[in-house]
């Protein structure tokens, strides 16, 4: 079988970096993106089939340059993983225009734009994935963290649009993935899962969930309600 090829946007640290390493260990060739030189990513590249590329999901020119550098139809998986928690002020009652703009551009609009530009790089029947969050589920929400939840719910609906408008007719699966609560700079030390535990599950999902549908799945393959 030909070597599988993935592009992970947002792979300088945390879940994105861990998944790049996990897929490379499983024999994949991985394009891993950073915004600025990342020492952690540079170390990973020393002994793995990982190629470093550059992209910022809030900078369309950087996304266009990234897309130009990879052969159309040559990828099995594109994962848009980039994301931020946003500032201290997470309340809709007091959010500023700048707070809303930053989180929506980084977690929803930027990822959707990135995904749209990367779709031609995917082979028919491939997988377009987003690192979403259970916190973007409306059905399973306790409230709180308004801005982060809003941005991931928005990402989910934009992912559905890409599936219905572009991916479906090419047999491309669209996956909105919940990585679990993970020990990263974002998740903190109290989180339930190590990066390794989360990315092992996410890699299993990416190797098996090829149905032409848009699904909301956790790292262990379980379905999350929208
Ligand atoms: P992290 O350690 O803070 O890493 C975030 C990654 O996103 C970094 O590689 C960062 O790059 C990149 N990034 C941020 N803004 C970007 C932009 N504008 N353009 C390109 N890349 C950008 O967080 P993480 O925990 O690994 O989170 C990864 C994803 O999982 C996020 O989408 C997050 O919302 C989601 N998630 C995490 C958890 C959790 O418990 N950790 C739970 C649910 C969902 P830089 O190094 O350049 O900043």
Image (tube, rainbow, N blue to C red):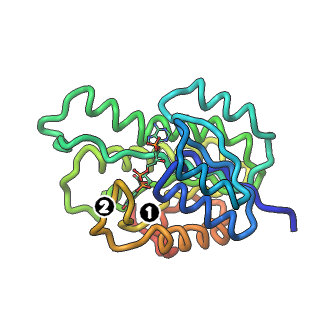
Residue 96 seen by the camera: yes
Q: Which residue is drawn at 46% across and 71% down?
A: 223
Q: Mark 2 falls on what kind of element?
A: loop
Is the distance from the Cβ of mark 2 to the nearest ligand 1 atom less than 8 Å? yes
Viewport quadrant of the C terminus: bottom left
Looking at the rendered structure, the number of numbered marks drawn on it comes to 2
Residue 223 located left or right of residue 121 = left
Q: On screen, 2 above or below 34?
A: below
Look at 20% across and 62% down and name the residue there.
Answer: 142
Secondary element under disc 1, as helix, strand or loop, is strand
Q: Quadrant of the N terminus?
A: bottom right
**Residue where numbered disc 2 is placed:** 188
- Return the x and y of residue 87 as percentages of the image width and height: 24, 40
Q: Is residue 168 visible?
A: no
Relative depth, front residue between 51 and 133: 51
Q: In which quarter of the image is residue 67?
A: top right
Q: Is mark 1 within 8 Å of ligand 1?
A: yes
x, y percentage for residue 150? 31, 45
């Amino acid at each position: 079988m030909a070597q599988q090829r993935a592009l992970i946007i947002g792979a300088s640290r945390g879940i994105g970096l861990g998944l790049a390493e996990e897929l490379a260990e499983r024999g994949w060739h991985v394009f891993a993106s950073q915004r600025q030189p990342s020492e952690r990513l540079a170390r990973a590249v020393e002994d793995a089939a990982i190629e470093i590329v550059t992209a910022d999901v809030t900078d369309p020119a950087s996304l266009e340059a990234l897309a130009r550098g990879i052969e159309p139809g040559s990828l099995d998986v594109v994962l848009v993983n980039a994301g931020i928690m946003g500032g201290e002020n997470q309340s809709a009652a007091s959010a500023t225009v700048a707070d809303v703009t930053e989180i929506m551009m980084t977690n929803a609009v930027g990822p959707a734009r990135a995904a749209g530009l990367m779709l031609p790089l995917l082979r028919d029947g491939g997988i377009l994935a987003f690192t979403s969050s259970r916190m973007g589920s409306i059905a399973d929400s306790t409230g709180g963290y308004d801005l982060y939840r809003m941005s991931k719910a928005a990402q989910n609906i934009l992912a559905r649009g890409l599936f219905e408008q572009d991916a479906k007719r090419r047999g491309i699966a669209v996956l909105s993935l919940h990585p679990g609560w993970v020990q990263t700079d974002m998740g903190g030390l109290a989180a339930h899962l190590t990066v390794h535990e989360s990315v092992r599950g996410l890699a299993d999902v990416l190797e098996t969930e090829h149905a032409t549908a848009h699904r909301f799945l956790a790292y262990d393959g379980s379905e999350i309600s929208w």
